[in-house]
Image (cartoon, coloured by chain):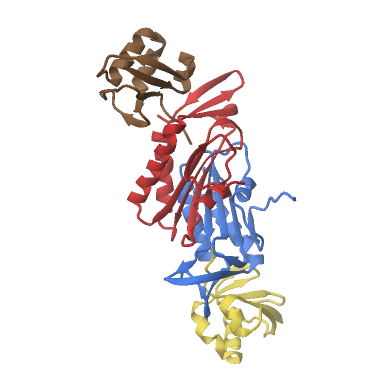
Chain colours: A yellow, B brown, C red, D blue
Amino acid sequence: MKVTVKLFAALREEMGSREFEQDLAPGSTVQELLDWMLEEYPALRPYVRSLHFALNHKYVTRQTELHDGDEVAFLPPVGGG
Amino acid sequence: MKVTVKLFAALREEMGSREFEQDLAPGSTVQELLDWMLEEYPALRPYVRSLHFALNHKYVTRQTELHDGDEVAFLPPVGGG
Amino acid sequence: MEKKTKLFEITDQEISSDEVVERLADPAIGAVIAFVGVVRGETDGREVRHLEYEAYPEMAEGTLCQIGAEIRERWKTIQQVAIVHRVGHLDIGEISVVIALSAAHRLEVFDAVHYAIDRLKEIAPIWKKEVWTGGAEWRSEA
Amino acid sequence: MEKKTKLFEITDQEISSDEVVERLADPAIGAVIAFVGVVRGETDGREVRHLEYEAYPEMAEGTLCQIGAEIRERWKTIQQVAIVHRVGHLDIGEISVVIALSAAHRLEVFDAVHYAIDRLKEIAPIWKKEVWTGGAEWRSEA
């Protein structure tokens, strides 16, 4: 299955991309997506602890299961206002 | 001595005037001015208990002594905002 | 248009909250809170047609300035205070008062603006007359 | 100009507090409180040249709407809530966010707007980058 991963702020700059598509095994969770990305992109490591995650525009936990076509966002600490 | 008396809101409407000049004995207080006006204008009576007073644009008590040329304001309960 | 710089003003002109906020302009400010009083169409279940505000302007601007001084005395982090109150005929939905406060950070601005409104209603020589179909009444919070 | 009616919006255009307050329009309202965030020229003693705000707009508008729902759930007297946040390049003194609340009376609007700002900073997917001479940094309150 395929999911779209969205990146923002410092993370977007670090990765040099706002968005990419990712192939995953069916039943993968947010945590598994993250683990896969950490192997591929070690530069992500310093951000991991402070990340939050959104699935199709709602906050979710790392244990949430993904489905084909999902939009997953990796959200560094927010700071609006 | 002469003072200027200013009236506002319900009191201005009741008295039909925004302002008038009043002759007073030297050393008169706000209370004495008020007493004099009550005799002259009984319509004032219902307002007396709730009035506040300003002398030359500052709140003062009824015991405050007046001087020639002073501007005395009779202030019904305020309600800005 | 002439740039307004008065922080405390009684005016018979329309008020804009943007314009009052601009009066606080200061490159160091970070948080501005603006309380905007809007004329209500209903009080105690009675349909209000319009309001008439009256002030003792020579005194009221000084009173508003005093409220500003009290706030800056009490909350040291408040940088600027502006209070602009309109008088005359006001229709429903029009702005009667704008109170704007600035601070480097947002802590305390809430307490300070609350205090400003309470003091305004308590000591500013400003009166409000509600006009409804068939009658009118001067209102106070006392 | 097209009338804006969105109560929760992420925009790359200039924000006006008057315009956001107008979005609340309702003849029964009496008190509106508007919190206006203004870009500061200085943080921690460092001179900021400008800010860059970034959002996840498809999510952020829903988050702002959720904050509005939380407020109306918690404070029953709050009638309307509008939150408009700007993104993109913002110069010193420009407005980054306007939070406007209306209620028939002014009680509770202070607590409610305070809550709105805290929640905005806590959950809205919006990021702020401070750019100063020779550097830049993404800032959060966490």
Q: How many marks?
A: 0
Q: Is residue D91 above or below residue A68?
A: above
State the residue at coordinates (45%, 29%).
C56
Q: Nearer the viewer, residue A33 or B6?
A: B6
Q: Residue furthest right?
A: D2
Q: Is residue C123 left or right of residue A47?
A: left
Q: Position of residue C86 (x, y in %)?
A: 53, 36
- Residue C92 sits in quarter: top right
User: Is residue D128 shown above or below C42?
Assistant: below
Q: Quadrant of the C terminus of chain C?
A: top left
Q: Residue at x 31, y 29 (%)?
A: B60
Q: Quadrant of residue C45?
A: top right
**Which residue is located at x 62 percent, y 36 percent?**
D27
Question: Along the line of sight, which residue is nearer the eye, B48 or B5?
Answer: B5
Task: Provide residue D110's location: percent of width, then percent of height.
Answer: 46, 48
Residue B39 visible in the shown view: yes
Q: Is residue B51 left or right of residue D110?
A: left
The residue nearer to you, when weighing A65 against C134, is C134
- On the image, the x and y values in percent for residue B50 come to 36, 22
Residue at (61% x, 62% y) in the render: D86
Which sits in the foreground, D52 or A59? D52
Q: Is residue B39 above or below residue C71?
A: above
Q: Is residue A29 visible?
A: no
Q: Is residue D84 left or right of residue B15?
A: right
Q: Quadrant of residue B29?
A: top left
For residue C101, above or below residue D63:
above
Residue A41 appears at what percent x and percent y? 59, 89
